[in-house]
Amino acid sequence: MTLIAAATETAPTTTRRRLQFVVKGLPAPQGSKSFKGFSRKGHAILKESSDKVAPWRTDVVIAAETAIEQTLGFKPFQGPVHLIIEFYMPRPKGAPKTRRVVPDVTPDLSKLVRSTEDALKTAAVWRDDSQVVDLTTRKRYATFGDEQLGHPWELPGIGAVVTVIEMDHEDTWADGPLDVHAATRLPLPTLPRELARLPIPGVARTDEWGSEAIVVPATATDSKARQLLARALKESTRRAERYRADGIAPANALAVIVEGGAHRLASPAGRPLTPLQADVIQLAEEAETDFTEIVVILAAAVE
């Protein structure tokens, strides 16, 4: 399955004409132009301030023309279009290697769009840039296939994924406030499904669970929290082995209370599990499977 197919296989179908292609190369912004004098005919000679713009435009034109050649009977879009561009920038050497970050640095996203739009006109994708009435775009760092840093459908290297979709004027009756759309795309973090079924009381009282209760304080670092969970997991294994060997169930339940767990263990949709989330899930699953009388609780507060 191709990258584009993988990214769009679950997308809603549309009867609108569309063109989609991948541009490989270094995205470059269209910046200001510097004055270089006048031509023999008296026209001002202007030069792009960035030497990287021309190669990027060439990359876009070649990719667009190749896609057009492979599209039977393609004709330039004549009416309104929705332009979608996903830019993938080089990841800096100093960027974190274990967590996802985004390029909130130059080049400006709007300038990347400008240079790309001009190239699409050159490639005869449409008549004029003014036909773009809807624009969806983003810039991200290329992750080169590392799924701890990005999605499997994202472009593995630097470049862009460009999609142009034909629109009808009547399509805009489906419009909604864009701030509502953004809120839908960026929902609040939620607990993974495996953790959402755990008890989530407002307050957990340790005196109700005895002196053996293991509390993971809200102030504990992830490293310290994982050490406490490892201790609980070791106890879970010991209880399970005793139950299997002697048929003796534990005399009392062992509570593992993660303070502020519902907030701490929540994550954005689509993010891979963190090591801490995975540890809590493993403990909860083993305790449930082996009848070890261990209860994992995600309490808002501990008293």
Image: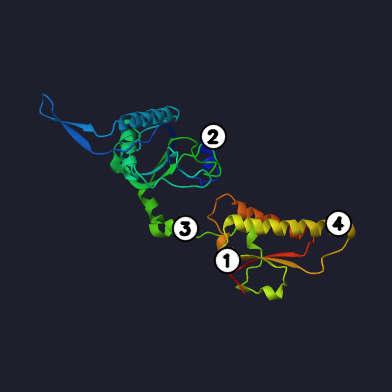
Which amino acid is tagged 2? Thr
Q: In the rendered structure, which disc, 3 or 2, sits on the residue that comes first in sequence?
A: 2
Residue denoted by label 4: 244
Circles 3 and 4: CB atoms closer than 8 Å: no
Q: Nearer the viewer, mark 2 or mark 1?
A: 1
Q: Secondary structure at mark 2?
A: loop
State which mark lies toward you, 4 or 2: 4
From this viewpoint, is residue 45 visible? yes
The mark nearer the N terminus, 2 or 1, is 2
Give the distance between the C-alpha atoms of the residues marked 4 and 2, in whole angstroms. 49 Å
The 10 Å Cα crowd at callout 3, few under 14, some 14 to 19, many 20 or more, is: few
Disc 2: CA contacts within 10 A as few (<14), some (14-19) or many (>=20): few
Give amino acid for label 3: Thr
The mark tally for this picture is 4
Q: Position of residue 155 (x, y in %)?
A: 48, 38
Q: Residue at x 67, y 58 (%)?
A: 229
Q: Residues within 10 Å of mark 1 (few under 14, many from 20)?
A: many
Question: Would you say the residues marked 3 and 2 are in contact, meaning their CB atoms lie under 8 Å apart?
Answer: no
In the picture of the structure, the residue carrying the numbered disc 1 is: 260
The residue tagged 3 is: 184
